[in-house]
Image (cartoon, grey):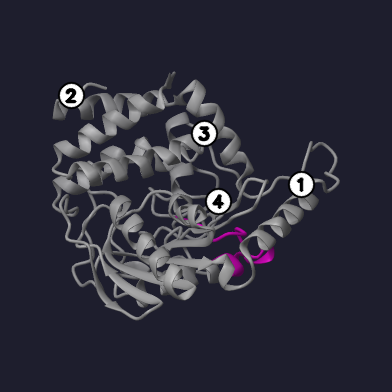
Amino acid sequence: MTYAYEKLHDFTFQLLCKIGCPPDQAKTASDVLLSADLRGVDSHGVARLSGYVRLWQKGRINPTPNIKITYETPSTAVVDGDGGLGLVVAPFAMKVAMEKAEKVGTGWVSVKNSNHYGIAGYHSMMALEKDMIGISLTNASPLVAPTFSQERLLGTNPISVAIPAKNQPPFVADMATTTAANGKLEILQRKGMDTPTGWVQDKTGLPTTSANGVKDGGALLPLGGDREHGSHKGYALGSVVDILSAVLSGANYGPWVPPFVAFLDPDPNPVGEGIGHFFGAMRVDAFRPADEFKSHMDNWITRFRNAKPTPGNDKVLIPGDPERELEAIRIKEGIPLLDPVVKDLTELGEKFGVKF
């Protein structure tokens, strides 16, 4: 069954207000969360709403954070999220990066003491409104085993880069540094399906196709799946995200990153504060005239889009194409939700007096 974007947004907004979020922050958080559903990243949309609420119930999310800059230079800053929703902390930090870019050409912001920030692409795409290139990174709870490791030491640690064009839609890369994000496993679990080979290893370090492999003590695999298919590169990318997001800001990193699930407690001996993010904004005209650059981006996109496709495929896609096309459909036709998600949201609404 499908649900109208406006209805889901209103439900999310009301529920976040019920747990104490100020209306402006509840709206921002709802915007971020529903953007995931619109763009087809269902694992990071309203399906996660109850997870944020449970973290609040455990006292691990501050609904009224005092988000502030703790250190800065003309082009850099460190932001303390005060334990707030990452859905609110991240847009604040990205705005800081953009303000600095407006003044000096580029802005770079590292964040500590935050929580899960939704889809990486929402934050990188904020820069497009200002003719800027946006970069968005975050670390996450350790579910990923580095190449050759049985231990889970990294998160899915996504990377997103958004680049403006002129007449063509923008280039928007938004990807986990694992073969698949953990949310994809959650969707397969709800559907009772197995994973493709290369997504997960079991608790002994051997390949498995069980969607419950991580729950059973196994781990997600870095992008590539195994050494022969380049998992050491996915491992390296995930490590870079972890270091820029957390080692640089003073957040927890590696195995010390607090878990998203409320039934698991954070490490009693943390190495930092909360989850970490990293944002960049680069003013295009700090490098060359913006109109000139965007015209060449159009040329780049057009040439790649017109590449001869391989047998069985209709066309070559540009990063961001599938999400943009799906957003246009879902804003008109509604957002499909799986029955377990509907049940979860209905129960959540009943608990807080908000009709789903």
292 left or right, relative to 170 = right
User: How far apart, in angstroms, are the residues tagged by discs 2 and 4?
Assistant: 36 Å
Disc 2 packing (10 Å; few <14; some 14–19; many ≥20): few
Say which mark, if any, is on residue 350. Answer: 2
Whether residue 223 is in magenta: the answer is yes
Q: Nearer the viewer, mark 3 or mark 2?
A: 2
Q: Mark 1 and mark 4 in contact? Answer it, CB < 8 Å.
A: no
| Viewer-side residue, 222 vs 353 | 353
Up the image or down, 57 lies above or below 130; here it is above
Query: Considering only order in the chain, which callout, 3 or 4, is on the residue closer to the N terminus?
Result: 3
Q: Residue at x 47, y 66 (%)?
A: 281
Spatial CA distance of label 1 from label 4 is 29 Å
Looking at the picture, which amino acid does disc 2 mark?
Glu
Tell me how far mark 4 sits from mark 3, CA to CA.
13 Å
The kind of secondary structure element at disc 3 is loop
What residue is disc 1 on? 305
Magenta range: 219-234
Horizontal side of residue 20 vs 296, given as left or right: left
Q: CA distance from mark 3 to mark 1?
A: 33 Å
Quadrant into which the N terminus falls: top left
Q: Amino acid at mark 1?
A: Arg
Position in image of residue 246 (x %, y %):
35, 71
Q: Going 32% across and 50% down the picture, which residue do you hit?
A: 87
Q: Residue 127: x percent and y percent?
A: 48, 57
Considering only order in the chain, which callout, 4 or 1, is on the residue closer to the N terminus? 4
Q: Which mark is residue 193?
A: 3
Q: Secondary structure at mark 2?
A: helix
Amino acid type shown at disc 4: Trp
Q: Are marks 3 and 2 in contact (CB under 8 Å)?
A: no
Q: Name the image quarter holding residue 355.
A: top left
Q: Position of residue 280 (x, y in %)?
A: 46, 67
**Is 93 above or below relative to 48?**
below
